[in-house]
Image (cartoon, helix red, strand yellow):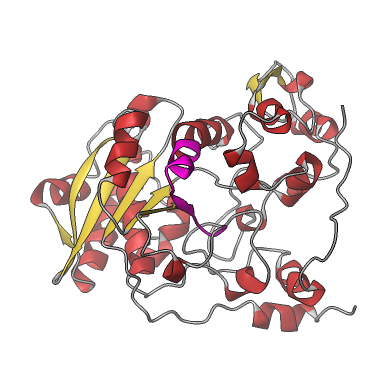
Amino acid sequence: MMHNSALTCARDCRPVSMTTRLGFDRLIHSDWSVAPNKRWTAIAERSPMGWSIASLAQTPSPPAFLDLLFDRPKTLAGFDFPIGLPSISLDKLGIGFCDLLALPASDHARRFLTPAETLFDISPAQPFYRRHPPGGRQADLLQRLDCTSFDDLLRACDRPTANRSRAESVFWTVGARQVGKAALSGWRDILMPARARGARLWPFDGRLSTLSSDALTLAETYPAEAYQHLGMKRTVKKRTQDGRTAAGAAMLGWASRHHVTISAAIGQLIKTGFGERSDGEDAFDAITGLCGMIEVADGRRAEALDALWNSPPCEGWILGQTDVPEHCSASLNAKADAGPRVGPIVRRRVRP
């Protein structure tokens, strides 16, 4: 079947403006980390006058946090860690991401979710690792995961867009931007028990408009994706107080324009760049991600590209990302051209 031209694909992938307000009454955003003392959570509640942000605090223990998530209906909770896997990994694993969460005791899932000791011990069936050995390179990761390019380890939504740089691959666990260890923690501590209690998972379970009546909906966020949605610069120096202060001024301007009420205490934190300590970036990201969620909940921003719904999403998506990722416009439309899969799915064999 002939696919559309690149120009046609890019045109077809443009989002349709979303003008319908979603039915969520509470938004929770967690800046997650493998280190409990670096987890911060911000909460907004809707009233007839609009949204009110009155809670910003370190995230409680996972059991207490789960109870908080479920204590109010019509809650949308966002988490700053990958919720999903690249398609090449799903093909080699042989099950979908939601199946992985639902069947953690299965042989496939148990091995996949148990980190190997070092980078040199991983395989497609066991791609995570505990320690990065001296001299370990991305080339070693690619070789052991049977990939030819680092792009193979990115989901479509991880790729760079016109408005932000590339997100990190869930399988690379080195450096300040690594997300793999936090993702494993978040999947085990939050997603799996929440799904067992009936939580829905966006976008795997459908559009937000079909999920807002459920008790709890979980979604992936990426604060850097929200910067320009809130009027900030594309690049924010969030590890410095001056950088956070400048970005905070844009955030407060956004809140004023859209009648979002911020408590005096939180407003003072935003004005002062969340303090002098470098870990102020964690609280900053918690608030930034929450404001990005308000943009979606109020209908000023679409939840995703329309093309995402051409077939059931398998890799996941970042909430509010409507820019076409580089080199992905054709592949998004190819899903629609291919139509629904019928019959058995032939998957790549997992390397022992």
Q: Measured from the top left, where is residue 285 in percent x and y?
A: 36, 46
In magenta, the rendered stretch is 191-204
Q: Measured from the top left, where is residue 115 in percent x and y?
A: 65, 23
Instruction: Tell me the residue at 52%/57% (across/down).
Output: 318
In the visual, does 134 lie left or right of 254?
Answer: right
* The quarter of the displayed image where residue 336 is located: bottom right
In the visual, does 143 lie left or right of 310?
Answer: right
The extreme left residue here reads 264
Instruction: Tell me the residue at 57%/54% (across/down).
Output: 165
Q: Measured from the top left, where is residue 130 in percent x and y?
A: 62, 19
Instruction: Tell me the residue at 20%/65% (across/down).
Output: 260
Magenta-colored stretch includes residue 193:
yes
Camera-nearest residue between 271 and 101: 101
How many marks on residues?
0
* The quarter of the displayed image where residue 308 is located: bottom right
Q: Measured from the top left, where is residue 225 in percent x and y?
A: 47, 57
In the visual, does 203 lie left or right of 237?
Answer: right
Instruction: Tell me the residue at 42%/42% (across/down).
Output: 197
* The quarter of the displayed image where residue 170 is located: top right
Where is 242 relative to 47, above or below?
above
Q: Quadrant of the N terminus?
A: bottom right
Residue 1 visible in rendering: yes
Camera-nearest residue between 341 and 198: 198
Where is 262 relative to 130, above or below?
below
In the visual, does 329 lie left or right of 207?
Answer: right
Residue 241 visible in rendering: no
Magenta-colored stretch includes residue 37:
no
Where is 136 relative to 17, above or below?
above
Where is 11 relative to 221, above or below?
below
